[in-house]
Image: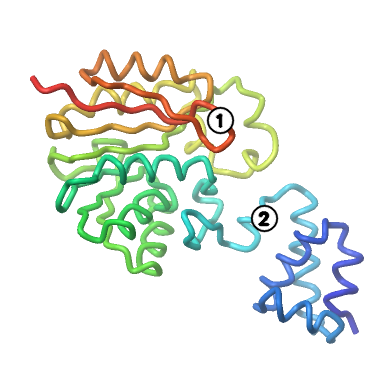
Amino acid sequence: MQTAQSLAQICGLPRLEARMLLEHVLQKSREWLLAHDTDPITPEQAASFLTLAAQRRQGTPMAYLVGVREFMGHQFEVSPDVLIPRPETELLVELVLNSCLGLSHPRVLDLGTGSGAVAISVALARPDAMVVASDQSAAALTVAQRNAQAQRARVQFWQGNWYEALPSEGQFDVIVSNPPYIAVSDVHLTQGDLRFEPRQALTEDADGLSALRIISAGAAAHLVPGGFLWLEHGFEQGAEVAAMLETAGFQQVQTFPDLAGLPRATGGTLRNL
C-alpha cells in the first residue's frame, strides 16, 4: 500500500511540488500531511497523484494541475483557458485603488479580464465600486464568473474584443488592462509556463504593441475627463506605451516598476479638453 511519503519519494518532483499535488489529490492541509504522511493512500488516489506528477514533469504549470493560484491574498480558480495570475500584476490593482482614492462609487473597467483576478480584487477592496470586466473568450469569462461568485464580488462581465464588448460607451473613472504584449518572435512563448497558457492572451501574433495601441487610442471615449488608464506591458515597452498615452491625450504619464524592479505598468490621466 502506497503512502504520501513513499509517493513523494518516487514521483521525481521537488518536495514542495510533490506536497502541493498531494494536498490537492487528498484534499488535505499541509499540517495534516505532516502528521499523516505514512498513512495508507487508496490506489485511486495514488494513480491520480502519479498522473499529475507526470504532467508536471512534462512542464504543465502547477497552477493548472491544482486549479488555483493566489493573487492579492485571494484564491482564484485557474484553467488552461486563462492566464495564470502573477505577482507583478498586483501592481495594476494597487494603481487602480490609488486612482480611486477620494472617489465615491468609482467606475472601473478591466479589459481582457481572464480569470477576473484584477477586477475581482478591485471589487473586493472597494465594495462601493461599479466594476465592469470584459474578455473576448467565453471560456475565460466562465472562469471569471465562477471566481466572482466564489469571492462574492460584484462584477459585471461582458464578452467581446476590447471596447466592442461594452453594451454602450459609458464613462469610467479608471480603465485597466493586462493585454497580450509579447511579440510573436519572442522565444519566451516556447519556454516555461507560457507554452501551456492561452496564446491569444499572450500575443496578438504581431509586435507585442497592437493591443496596447487599441486600448490607448480608444480610452478617451470611455473615460471621464481626468480619468485614469493603467496598462501592464513588457519591461522594454515602457517608453513606447508612455508615448502612446501622450498621443492619445493623457497627461502626468508615469511608468511604475514591479516587485523585481522592472518597468511593468504605465498610465496617466485623461487631459481635460
Q: Which badge, 2 or 1, is on the more N-terminal residue? A: 2
Q: Which mark is residue 126?
A: none
Above or below for 16 versus 176: below
Q: Residue furthest front?
A: 102
Tell me the crowding category of disc 2: few under 14, some 14 to 19, or many 20 or more residues within 10 angstroms, Cα based. some
The quadrant in which residue 95 appears is: top left
**Quadrant of the image containing the C terminus:** top left
Q: CA distance from mark 2 to mark 1?
A: 25 Å
Q: Nearer the viewer, mark 2 or mark 1?
A: 1
Q: Residue at x 74, y 71 (%)?
A: 22
Tell me whether the residue at label 2 lies in contact with that at label 1, contact meaning CB atoms closer than 8 angstroms: no
Callout 2 secondary element: helix
**211 or 161: nearer the eye?**
211
Q: Is residue 121 left or right of residue 31?
A: left
| Mark 2 residue type | Met
Question: Which residue was labeled with disc 1?
Answer: 261
Above or below for 149 versus 243: below
Callout 1 secondary element: loop
Q: Is residue 218 left or right of residue 257?
A: left
Tell me where residue 218 appears, x and y as whole percent.
23, 26
Tell me where residue 210 appears, x and y as whole percent.
40, 22
**Quadrant of the image containing the N terminus:** bottom right
Question: Which residue was labeled with disc 2?
Answer: 62
| Mark 1 residue type | Gly
Above or below for 258 versus 14: above
The quadrant in which residue 252 appears is: top left
Count of marks, rendered view: 2
Q: What coloring was used for the rendering?
A: rainbow
Above or below for 162 versus 220: below
**157 or 89: nearer the eye?**
89
Q: Residue furthest left?
A: 273
Tell me where residue 41 appears, x and y as whole percent.
81, 83
